[in-house]
Amino acid sequence: MSSYFDKFPRIVYSNTICIDISRRVVVANNVQNNLYAYHPYELKSHHRADTIANLYYDNPYYSWMVYLSNKTIDPYYSFPLIDDVFMKYIIKKYGSMENAKQKILFWELNWSGDAETDISVEFYRDTLPEPLKKYYEAIYGEGTRIIKYRRRREDWTINTNRIVTFFVENSTNDFEIDETVSLKTSSNTIQSNSVIVFSNSSQVTVQHVFGNTTIGNNHLEFLYGNSSNATANVTSMYIVANNVSIAEQVYWSPVYAWDYEESLNEQKKFIKLIDSKYTLDVENSLEKKLNE
């Protein structure tokens, strides 16, 4: 039974006959560009390309059709990883599961968690502060009459909400760039978590700052590196960038590495497959073009 690479031409390389896998072709444009030629398919946790091909095309050697349907380049990471492999991937990439759950990658508008909360026209007009009106959109009744406002359904993202430099003393200067740092009080209460972008013996600059960062009065007094275990006493602070004001903070949520990677892995379960009735057309087109 033939396989995908059986269709590639043979060449002589270093006095050895081998398959020329460098060849790339555009196969059956009339099929690939036809939305109705595809069927949606949801992968199960144990599915591989060959098992999908066997289930749908009745031929495990048609795994290349699965890759072709989804324009797959990396057959390993383009498909969802099973649980134990996914865990190993996370640990290799982020150091530990805990790091992945603490590490903030970016911020996103959190309208989906507040999608059903509407406000009246009067509240929008008379009470809602002007800087917050951009987070709402009008809902129209008959004609052009606005009947209410709802959370704006936009997938806005920002790299970070806030960047702060803390001036420190008694620092062990062992903080690691990109590690999560806890901002604590003298009573060891965590007031905020952030990510380090710069550190030396006198100052530590962090991003993704949220929570209480007030200095003194049983508020923020020292920093603790969650990976390095480094510590430093805070004497003062300086806001370098304030992309999201305190009033706007409620409209944004941090996206943690674990949630982001898990979401990406989940999305990979939903693929598409070229309709089996086109199998022979695509196969013949591939073989013809590869050997032109």
Image (cartoon, rainbow, N blue to C red):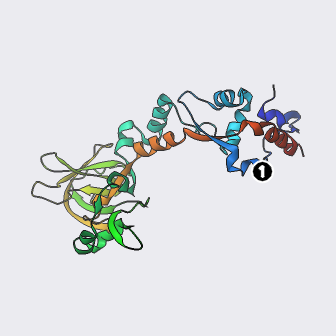
Residue sitting at 48 percent across and 34 percent down? 86
Q: Residue furthest top?
A: 1
Residue 213 visible here: yes
Q: Amino acid at mark 1?
A: Asn
Asked if 272 appears above or below 191 in the picture, the reply is: above
Q: Position of residue 247 (x, y in %)?
A: 25, 65
Left or right, 154 with respect to 45, comes to: left
Q: On the rendered image, what quadrant is the N terminus found in?
A: top right
Secondary structure of residue under mark 1:
helix
Q: Position of residue 61 (x, y in %)?
A: 74, 29
Between 264 and 184, which is closer to the camera in this rendering? 264
Left or right, 27 with respect to 126, comes to: right
Q: Position of residue 44 (x, y in %)?
A: 54, 30
Picture quadrant of residue 276: top right
Q: Position of residue 241 (x, y in %)?
A: 33, 67
Residue sitting at 54 percent across and 38 percent down? 269
Residue 243 visible here: no
Q: Residue furthest left?
A: 217
Mark 1 surroundings: few (<14), some (14-19) or many (≥20) residues within 10 A: few
Left or right, 212 with respect to 177, comes to: left
Picture quadrant of residue 204: bottom left
Asked if 41 appears above or below 233 in the picture, the reply is: above
Left or right, 25 with respect to 102, comes to: right
Q: Look at mark 1 in the image and give the residue it sits on.
A: 30
